[in-house]
Image: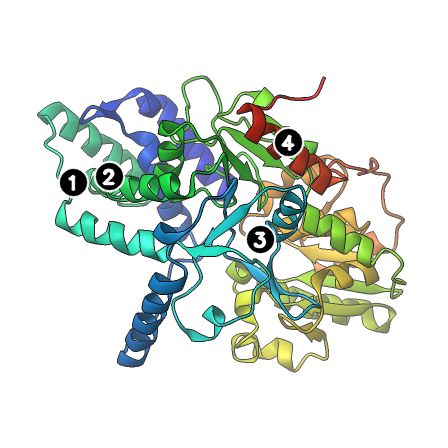
Amino acid sequence: MTYRELTEKLLALEEEFDLFGRTVAGVLFWDLVRRRVHGAVLVKEEMVPAHVPERRGLARFVRMAFGFVWIALFKNPFLVSRADIVVFGSDRRRLQEDGLWHDIYCDSLIDRLEQEGMRCLMVENPPLGGELARRPIKTRRTAHLSVIQASASVLFRLRPVRLSLSGEERAFLKLVETRLARELGVRVRLQAMLEDALGKARATSPFYKAFLRKSAPRAVVVVKPMGKRSLITACRELGIPVVELQYSDIHRSNLAYSYEGPKRVQQGAPDYLFLFGDFWKRNVSFSLPKERVFAVGFPYYEQERAKYANLKKRRGQILFLSKPIAQGALSRFAIEVARELGDAWHIVYKLYERESMNWKERYPWLADSGIEVVAEGEQPLYELFAESEVQVSGDSTAVYEGVGFGLRTFLLELPGTDNMEPLVKSGHAELVASAHQLKALLEHPRRVQRETKEEFFKKNALGYMTSLIKKLCVSGAIRQAE
């Protein structure tokens, strides 16, 4: 089954059992475990990578211990001063020309807000100790989430949640588990998942509230809200509005955002959602009302596109954007395309961040192929977009950025590619199944597509985002412009 087919089966079970309307132990339980169940299904079918815990050892333990002590002394969220805006960052930084590592979703926004007189604080969760923790970063004022997490972890273990369910509730959960196993082939323990979710919420809530009272923000901005439900709930209880920034692609099968129909209500939803562009509004039914969903743009993308606006195209360059979950299928396809096209086209294979360290062992056929392979940090992705004419990939947010650069786009049928159907239907991408088919399509002019303009990424992002957040801090609410 495809990614979308698996998700549709889960959505059908939600309807059949009225999962969003059922209470267990006095709580509406399903939204608390929904994404975890969906994730288990996708991992089993190898649609998304499984979580691999880091190797443990004495050296790592010592490194983490020293790292935590340093954080507790110098980056402790309970020792911060007041801030107008608290930003929970993306934990993803890129090295920029100034020699600093930037949070690509937040740093430019923080700079602009501070220029406007707003005092900002970023909370992030980098690894404890090691090389990544020692990188020089752009953000001036930061605190580390690990102090809150460690405090909550102790409380979670001291006071675990153990639910006492009625016979009817146990029978209902068992029935749902049986159907999940039969329909989707995944075995889960819903009661254990619910106890874990409730326990973590109870453990983290008081520490988030203590931090929020100490920092006293007028608004909170969150990039990745997953796992921060209790933060958003704490903000709501303290009267602090929360804005979520889009950081990846959004589609109907992304159950972090997809809440179709009146019965599906997201618990712990932010107050406002800032999207890259209007395209993303059309493909998903959000839990938030429409007037709280804004198309604002993506400042980093806008900045990088302007930087490379005058870069000359390399005639005949095809950019492949790697997708690790494809387990080598895309890299093998790149080799087939290179053989099919010969010297008429130049193939560049851009590795995904996690592949760069061991790609020669992972894809030995690629190492000996003669294809130009670009590892992380060797050449900026946006520069590759600017100099290429064509891009080939699967399900990736970067594909939309490439479309914005004017690249003719081909999508190989890989796990998750079916989530890109709106891009194909809109005429911005074409599906391919073989190197021969790709060659035939390249020999014909690209079909007419609608002008992208601001469809995917709205322009003047920084100004608009700053204006909205300032209004939110002043009035406590914002609304769509007339």
- Name which quarter of the figure residue 31 lies in: top left
Which disc number belongs to residue 414? 3
Q: Are marks 1 and 2 in contact (CB under 8 Å)?
A: yes
Which disc number belongs to residue 53? none
The nearer-to-camera label among 4 and 3 is 4
Q: Can residue 181 be seen in this view?
A: no
Residue that mark 4 sits on = 468
Residue in the picture at 26% in, 49% down: 152
Q: Give how far apart the Cα atoms at labels 1 and 2 are.
A: 9 Å
- Measured from the top left, where is residue 124 in percent x and y? 46, 54
Q: Give how far apart the Cα atoms at labels 2 and 3 are.
A: 40 Å
Q: Do the residues labelled 1 and 4 touch (CB within 8 Å)?
A: no
- Identify which amino acid the numbered label 2 is placed on: Arg
Instruction: For label 1, count other residues whose C-alpha is less than 10 Å away and answer few (under 14), some (14-19) or many (20+).
Output: some
Would you say 43 lies left or right of 300 here? Answer: left
Residue in the picture at 33% in, 39% down: 209
Q: Nearer the viewer, residue 203 or 354?
A: 203
Q: Earlier in the sequence, mark 3 or mark 1?
A: 1
Residue that mark 2 sits on = 202
Residue that mark 1 sits on = 161
Mark 2 element type: helix
The nearer-to-camera label among 1 and 2 is 2
Mark 1 element type: loop
Tell me the quarter of the image containing the C terminus. Answer: top right
- Name which quarter of the figure residue 338 lies in: bottom right
